Image (tube, rainbow, N blue to C red):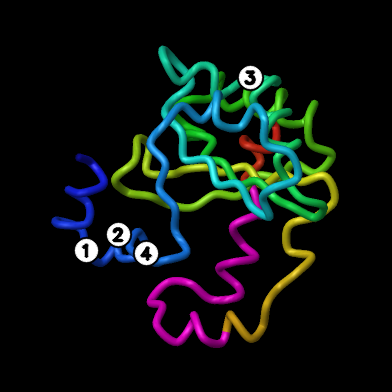
Amino acid sequence: MVIDACKKYLPTISCGLSDSRVEILVQDAIEYIKDKKNEFDIVLIDSTDPMGPGEGLFTEEFYTNVKNSLKEGGIVAAQSESPFVNKEEIKKMYNLLKKVFPVCSTYTSNIPTYPGGYWAWAFCSESVKPLSYFADDRYEDIVKTCKIYNRDYHNARFALPNYLKELL
């Protein structure tokens, strides 16, 4: 019902859900990812908070299964909470991610509607470093329609304030 409501009431944001290349699966991610090996170029994790039913999405076992699901050169991007509101959760999450992924970086942005107004995401890979690749041709197509995004803004997302560096 949530997906249908998004399509109906948030058509601008949800328009990609109807793309023929998109497959929507409503199921337990922990179970789904267990048997996947070398299948994905990118895994995006927009999970619940690390409490209650969502706790299993913040374990070394889950992150290892996600890593195993990646093709060579694959990357993971995962929401990693508010650096203001969820300090202990972020610290625990990054400790686990760093055990599993040789490359683990944080990027941030202002999200006024989220708790604290400032949010973090993890960029993880076995070999790909963030900012090591930039698709100039894709950028030129995308930036024309953007009011916020540009190359400087993109690069600045990985510049962290001292308190966050110390936390992680």
Disc 4 marks a residue whose amino acid type is: Gly
Q: Earlier in the sequence, mark 4 or mark 1?
A: 1
Q: What distance separates the C-alpha of mark 2 from that of mark 4?
A: 5 Å
Q: List the single residue furthest toward the top.
A: 52
- Please tell me how crowded label 3 is: few (under 14), some (14-19), or many (20+) other residues with Cα within 10 Å: some
Image marks 2 and 4: residues in contact by CB distance under 8 Å: yes
- The residue labelled by disc 1 is 11
Q: Is residue 123 above or below residue 65?
A: below
Q: Which residues are magenta?
A: 140-160
Image marks 3 and 2: residues in contact by CB distance under 8 Å: no
Q: Say which of 71 and 118 sits in front.
A: 71
Viewed as shown, does residue 22 lie left or right of 132? left
Image marks 4 and 1: residues in contact by CB distance under 8 Å: no
Q: Is residue 121 above or below residue 135?
A: above
Q: Earlier in the sequence, mark 3 or mark 4?
A: 4
In magenta segment, residue 148: yes
Q: What distance separates the C-alpha of mark 1 from that of mark 2?
A: 5 Å
Q: What distance separates the C-alpha of mark 4 from that of mark 1?
A: 9 Å
- The residue labelled by disc 4 is 16
* Image location of residue 35, percent across then percent down: 67, 30
Q: Is residue 50 above or below residue 149?
A: above
Q: What distance separates the C-alpha of mark 3 from that of mark 2?
A: 29 Å
- Please tell me how crowded label 1 is: few (under 14), some (14-19), or many (20+) other residues with Cα within 10 Å: few
Mark 4 secondary-structure assignment: helix
- Please give the label number shown on residue 59: 3
Disc 1 marks a residue whose amino acid type is: Pro
Name the residue: 44% across, 58% down: 22
Disc 3 marks a residue whose amino acid type is: Thr
Disc 2 marks a residue whose amino acid type is: Ser
In magenta segment, residue 8: no
